[in-house]
Image: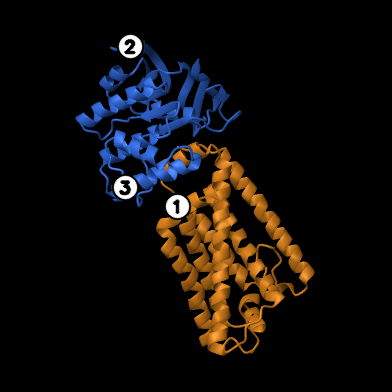
């Protein structure tokens, strides 16, 4: 079954084409990688799939709902775009609790479990502004997984992480995928993508120029 | 209510400054008026009408209004401050509804307008009672002045958000300050945007008409704001 379908999606910003005729058909339960240099359109594609940006032309369908027609945003999604952002004056736990309050479908213990999965201390009362970039990145990943969504978009999730943390995030991504979650991720590092993904889309100048299937070691 | 609570969480960091503003500007203005001997009457209602009904009675009254308006514009710099974009994006995705998010922002603005104007009235009433020995008695005209000022202030706030969307922050702030400055000075306002002050509209039918137009204008601007944000791209 399809998780995401894009039909001839293009985006123009102030006359400049940033995405051009993107057609995608992504099945549920896979991990998809998007590779390409800065400005190739990866982040813009993620913004369009998450509903934050409207395409200039074409349609986006997520879990059968046409964005900006049936729904404004996909129903069961979490995103990490570019850099993690939080309410800096609050603790990590309070930040996650603040976001969890909106849907009100998980308990405090679920938040604690998500934080422990990314090796953050839920009892840490320090405001997030005192966290390092790596800790903020891990907190953003905790936010993405805490509600166990069906679709996760991770834009450069390994930014600011040391080698051990990267391996740990690999493990989390695989675990999330094993429970049936569809994951889309971008990375500058080809190794991240080849280690994790089932299929890799290479982008350049707002277009998909190549698709590669990767046989994963089980 | 849950979503209103989220709004409070967003502005919690500035809450002390917000509350301080709600007290300092009205208090300072009231002190100027007391020092300037603006209150000649022994009646609380008449004194309140002097203070809130017009600006043409004395320079102290004019100063009071300028302070009150200036404080209000600063208040909205805090309440509707630009937010960390990734947090805002996550909230929008989780809410799945941009309209709800901006209706909440507008609602929180109305709440703090009520708080600010209530604080101004409270400080003025208490000052008159304590320093001038007036007896406490609420007259209908005091309530009417309160409603007029809340509606008029909030109309300026909605216009501020509207202008921020279409122009720049800087232009919107300067424009609203200019409107306030010009508005409080006008002897005979011909546009509803300029003060629903009770002295300008002694005939209550006219006042109610002006209030109605202000409320309709406010709803119209609010609707445009919500619709515009609905169709906006969030980069």
The Cα–Cα distance between marks 2 and 1, rounded to whole angstroms, is 45 Å
Query: The residue tagged with tag 1: helix, strand or loop?
Result: helix
Quadrant of the rendered image containing residue B37: bottom right
Specify how the rendered protein is coloured. by chain
Q: Quadrant of residue B110?
A: bottom right
Residue at the location (54% across, 64% down)?
B177
- Report the residue marked by disc 1: B9
Quadrant of the rendering where the C terminus of chain B is positioned: top left
Classify residue B227 by image quadrant. Answer: top right
Picture coordinates of residue B78, whole percent (x, y): 46, 58
**Res B51 label:** none
Q: Which residue is mark 3?
A: A128
- Return the mark for residue A214: 2
Q: In this image, A180 relative to B145: left or right?
A: left
Tell me, by letter, which chain the rendering colours blue: A
Q: Is residue B178 at least partly visible in the picture? A: no
For marks 3 and 1, give the CA distance. Answer: 15 Å
Chain holding disc 2: A
Q: Secondary structure at mark 2?
A: loop
Q: Residue at x 30, y 33 (%)?
A: A117
Q: Residue furthest left?
A: A163
Residue B175 visible in this rendered orientation of the protein: yes
**Which chain is orange in the rendering?**
B
Label 3: chain letter: A
Q: Earlier in the sequence, mark 2 or mark 3?
A: 3
State which mark lies toward you, 2 or 1: 1
């Amino acid at each position: 079954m399809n998780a995401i379908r894009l039909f001839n999606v293009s985006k123009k910003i102030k006359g400049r084409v940033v995405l051009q005729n993107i057609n995608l058909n992504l099945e549920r339960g896979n991990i998809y990688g998007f590779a390409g240099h800065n400005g190739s359109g990866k982040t813009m594609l993620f913004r369009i799939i998450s509903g934050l940006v409207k395409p200039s032309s074409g349609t986006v369908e997520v879990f059968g709902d046409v964005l900006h027609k049936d729904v404004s945003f996909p129903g069961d999604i979490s995103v990490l775009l570019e850099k993690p952002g939080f309410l800096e004056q609050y603790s990590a736990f309070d930040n996650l609790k603040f976001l969890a309050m909106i849907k009100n479908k998980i308990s405090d213990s679920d938040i604690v479990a998500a934080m422990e999965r990314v090796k953050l201390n839920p009892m840490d009362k320090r405001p997030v502004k005192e966290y390092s970039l790596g800790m903020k990145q891990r907190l953003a990943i905790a936010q993405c997984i805490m509600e166990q969504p069906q679709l996760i978009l991770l834009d450069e999730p390994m930014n600011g992480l040391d080698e051990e943390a990267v391996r740990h995030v690999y493990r989390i991504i695989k675990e999330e995928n094993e429970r049936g979650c569809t994951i889309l991720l971008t990375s500058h590092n080809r190794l991240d993508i080849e280690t994790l993904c089932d299929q890799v889309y290479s982008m350049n100048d707002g277009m998909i120029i190549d698709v590669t299937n990767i046989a994963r070691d089980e | 209510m849950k979503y209103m609570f989220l709004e409070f969480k967003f502005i919690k960091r500035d809450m002390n400054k917000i509350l301080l503003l709600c007290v300092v500007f009205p208090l300072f203005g009231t002190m100027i008026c007391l020092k300037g001997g603006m209150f000649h009457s022994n009646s609380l209602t008449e004194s309140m009408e002097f203070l809130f009904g017009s600006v043409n009675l004395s320079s102290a009254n004019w100063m009071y209004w300028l302070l009150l308006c200036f404080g209000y514009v600063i208040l909205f710099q805090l309440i509707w401050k630009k937010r960390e974009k990734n947090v805002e994006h996550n909230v929008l995705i989780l809410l799945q509804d941009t309209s709800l998010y901006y209706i909440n922002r507008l609602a929180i603005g109305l709440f703090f307008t009520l708080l600010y104007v209530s604080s101004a009235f409270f400080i003025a009433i208490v000052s008159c009672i304590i320093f001038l020995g007036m007896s406490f008695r609420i007259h209908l005209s005091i309530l009417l002045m309160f409603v007029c000022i809340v509606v008029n202030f909030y109309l300026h706030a909605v216009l501020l958000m509207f202008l921020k969307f279409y122009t720049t922050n800087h232009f919107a702030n300067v424009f609203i300050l200019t409107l306030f400055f010009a508005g409080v000075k006008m002897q005979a306002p011909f546009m509803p945007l300029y003060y629903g002050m009770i002295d300008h509209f002694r005939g209550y039918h006219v006042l109610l008409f002006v209030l109605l137009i202000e409320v309709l204008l406010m709803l119209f601007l609010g609707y445009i704001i919500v619709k515009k944000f609905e169709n906006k791209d969030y980069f």
